[in-house]
Image (cartoon, rainbow, N blue to C red):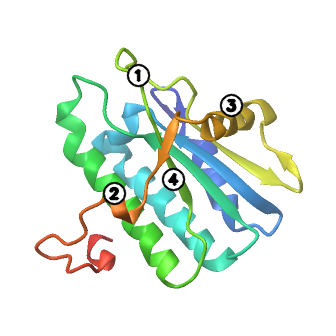
Amino acid sequence: MTDEGLDLGVWRERVAALESGSVTAAVLVQCDLAWLRPNLLALRNEIDQAVMKAQLRRGDGFTVDRVVLHSLPVGFAAAARTFEEWQLRMAAAGLLLCADGRPAPRIHRLILGGDQSSAPIPDMVELLENGDWTDHQRAGLALDIIHTVGATTPLTGYDMNLDGPFGDADPSVYM
């Protein structure tokens, strides 16, 4: 089953494998604007929950790098609310994990140039299992972007206003 080029079966299969003891790292790229469509909300939430659950259960020695857009390209204002809510929830989840002393997923916001309307890398979920990536080339593309100075900026709780009318500096209200 696919949605605009996203192989949803592969996403579900690999995200479920995050809890496997043989998986020591994962890299997820979710830069396609399709992730903001209402029909992918359930899958997006499923992925977010699986990543957080794996981090909670697995702890040290397990790393997750996620790449999402830093901001929406020009002309996509209709998706702005969904985009902001998703980033807020990822930042709040990271704060909650860090508050308990656990490592949080590293979320890298991909910075698009003014003339770019899409990410230069495909969406993916690649796992490092028993020392081998599920797809070395694709994982390498994502890791190269992550390690390129100025290509991304981290998403942290400091980037989000968690002191809204219901927040009171408690990120759990956004979950």
Count of numbered circles on the image = 4
Q: Which residue is mark 1?
A: 113
Callout 3 crowding tier (Cα within 10 Å): few <14, some 14–19, many ≥20: few
Disc 4 versus disc 1: nearer the observer = 1
Indicate left or right for 51 with 78 as reference.
right
**Rounded to the nearest whole Å, what is the CA distance between mark 4 and mark 1?**
19 Å
Q: Is residue 16 above or below residue 31?
A: below
Give the residue at x 35% y 63%.
158
Crowding around mark 4 (Cα neighbors within 10 Å: few <14, some 14 to 19, many 20+) is many
* Mark 2 surroundings: few (<14), some (14-19) or many (≥20) residues within 10 A: few
- Check disc 4 and report the residue beneath it: 107
Q: SS of the residue at dot 2?
A: helix
Residue at screen point 10% across, 73% down:
165
Of the numbered discs 4 and 1, the one sitting upstream in the chain is: 4
In whole angstroms, how far apart are the C-alphas of marks 2 and 1?
A: 20 Å
User: Mark 2 vs mark 3: which is more N-terminal?
Assistant: 3
Disc marking residue 159: 2
Q: Which residue is mark 3?
A: 141
The alpha-carbon separation of the residues under discs 4 and 2 comes to: 12 Å
Real-space CA distance between mark 3 and mark 1, rounded to the nearest whole angstrom: 18 Å
Q: Nearer the viewer, mark 3 or mark 1?
A: 1
Q: Position of residue 167 (x, y in %)?
A: 20, 76
* Nearer to me, 124 or 12: 124
Q: Quadrant of residue 57?
A: bottom right
Q: Is residue 78 above or below residue 102?
A: above
